[in-house]
Amino acid sequence: MNNKVKIILFSILILSFLLRLYNFRSYYVFSHDQDLASWIIKDILVNGHLRLIGQETSSQGVFIGALFYYLQIPFYLFGRMSPLSAVFLPVILGVFATYSLFFVFSKIANIKLGLIAAFIYAVSALIVFVDREVAPTMPVMLWTMWYLYSLFLIYKSKYLKGFVLNIFLIGLIWHLNPSLILLTPLVLVAFLFSKKKIDKVTIFNVKAILIGFLVLFLTSLPLIFFEFRHDFSQTKAVILSLTTKKDFIQGTSTGFAKFDRVMQLVNKNTISIFSKHHFIHPSIVFILLISLLYYFIKIKKINLFLSTTFILWLGLYIVFFSLNSKNPSEYYFNGMNIIWIFIASLGLFELKKTKVGLLLFYLLTILFFLVNINYIFKYNPDKKGYIEKVDLVKYINADRIKRDYPCISISYITNPGYDLGYRYLFYLENMHVNRPISNSPVYTIVYPHNLVNSIDKAFGSLGLIYPDYDRYNKEEVEKSYIGANSNLTDPMFGYTE
C-alpha cells in the first residue's frame, strides 16, 4: 500500500470507530438479550461456572455457544461488572470488520474497490447499528468476510491456509448464528473451480485436511462436551427443527406467502444498507443489484468462480428460509450483506473510469455519506434503554432504603417481552426483589405511559407507580424478606445452568 491508500484507509477506520462509539450510552439498547448476557457473565465470574453454552435460541432446545460471552469478560472486569462496558467489544469488532472488508476485497478484486467497500461498511447506518449490538449474532458479517476469503484461497489452490481458515470459521458457527451453516456447501464450489485440481492425495493435501479437522475439533469442544453430557439434546432439537414444524409459530406465513415474506425482508435489508430512509420501493434496489451482478458476470468483471459463489450464497438463504418452518427476522439475512456491498462497490469502481461516471461516483458517495450520517446523528431512541432503566432501578432502590424496606416486589404494566431486561440491574443494586404475590411493597413499571391513566414518575418512556405505602407495615415486609431472593432464584427465559 502506498501512503495515500494508508491515509484513506486510516481515515475510514477512524470514521468507523467514531460512528460506532457515538452517543453509546443513550443508544445502548439494554433489553432481554443484554440482561441475559450479563447474567451469564455473572454466572461465570461470580459463581465460577465455566459455561459450555450461552442463551437458548428461538429454536427450542438449541443454544448459542458461549464464545461471545467470554469475550465480554475483560470489559466487565474493567467496568466493575457494569453492563455498559460491554458496548466496547462490538465497537472493536466493528472497526476490525471494516478493515477486514478492505483486506478481503483488495485480495479478491483490487485496493480501490476494497477502500470503497470499507467506506460503505464504515458509514452505513444499518451496519453501524448492527455492529453496536451487544449480542452473539453481532460478528456475523465479520465471519462472512473471512469465509469468503477462505473460499478464495482454496480457489487459488492455497489449500492449507484456505481449508484451515474455512474449517476454523465453520467451528465458530455455533457461537454466532446457526444459519451460517447454509454457506458451508460453498467450499465444494471453491474446490471445483480450484486452479490446481485435486486429482490425487498428496502429503500437502493430507496435512491441510488433518490440521483443518484438528481445528474443527478444538473449536467444537464445548459443543461436543455439552452434547455428550446431555444425551445429544441439541442435535436432536436441530433434527426436529429441520424435519418437523417444531419451530412453527401459529399464524405465520407458509407456501408462496412465506417466500413473499422472505423477499420483503431481503429487500428491506438490501436497501437499508445504503439508506435507512426508503426513498424508493425496497425491491428496486434488490433488482438493481441483481441486474448489476448479471451485467458484471456477462462482461466478465466477475469471474465464473465468484459469480457461482455469489449466486449460490444469495440463493441458499432465500430458498432455505422460504421452505423452512422457522419465522425469520431481518438479522437472519445479514449474512447476505457482504455480497450486496461487493456488487455496489464494483459498480462505483466502474463508474470512476469515465468523466461523467466519476462525477456520478462523487455525487452518489456524498449523498450516501450525508443520508447515513444524518440518520446516525439524529437517531431518536425510544428512551427505554440502558440510561432510563438504570435511573429507574436506582430510584426504586433509593426510595426503598429511605423507607427502610428490606425487600420489595416489582410488577409490570406493559406488552409481553417489555417486562424483561431489569434483573441484572436489580442484582447490581443488591436488591432483594420478590414476586408481587408476596407482602413486599409493589413498585409498578409502566411502558408505554398511555397504558395507565397516570404515573408517579417518568424515566424517559418508562413510568413508575409507587406502592400504596399505607397498606404495608414493617413486620409484614420483614416476614416477606425471609426466604429466597426471587430475583436470583426465579427461572429466566433463555437462561439455563
Image (cartoon, grey):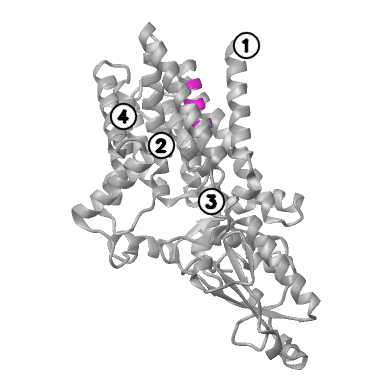
* Earlier-in-chain disc, 4 versus 2: 4
Where on the picture, by quarter, is residue 470?
Answer: bottom right
Where residue 449 appears, as percent x and y from the top left, is 53, 67
Is label 3 in a helix, a strand or a loop?
loop
Residue 141 appears anywhere in the view: yes
* Earlier-in-chain disc, 3 versus 1: 1
**Disc nearest the viewer among 3 and 2:** 2
Q: Is residue 138 above or below residue 470?
A: above
Where residue 92 appears, as percent x and y from the top left, is 63, 38
Q: What stretch is highlighted in magenta?
A: 115-122
User: How far apart in space, not on screen, are marks 1 and 4 (Cα)?
Assistant: 33 Å
Q: In this view, does 42 lie above or below 274?
A: below
Question: Which of these two is toward me, 47 or 471?
Answer: 471
Task: State if disc 4 and disc 1 touch (CB < 8 Å).
Answer: no
Instruction: Say which residue label 1 marks.
Output: 3
Queried whether the magenta region covers residue 54, the answer comes back as no
Amino acid type, label 1: Asn
User: How far apart in space, not on screen, are marks 4 and 2 (Cα)?
Assistant: 12 Å
Is label 2 in a helix, a strand or a loop?
helix
* Earlier-in-chain disc, 3 versus 4: 3
Report the label total. Answer: 4
* Earlier-in-chain disc, 1 versus 4: 1
Amino acid type, label 3: Pro
User: How far apart in space, not on screen, are marks 3 and 2 (Cα)?
Assistant: 17 Å
Queried whether the magenta region covers residue 120, the answer comes back as yes
Where residue 265 appears, as percent x and y from the top left, is 33, 47
Instruction: Say which residue label 2 marks.
Output: 337
| Residue appearing at x 34%, y 26% in the figure | 306
Instruction: Say which residue label 3 marks.
Output: 136
Amino acid type, label 4: Leu
Q: Is residue 464 above or below residue 153?
A: below
Q: Which quadrant does the C terminus fall into?
A: bottom right
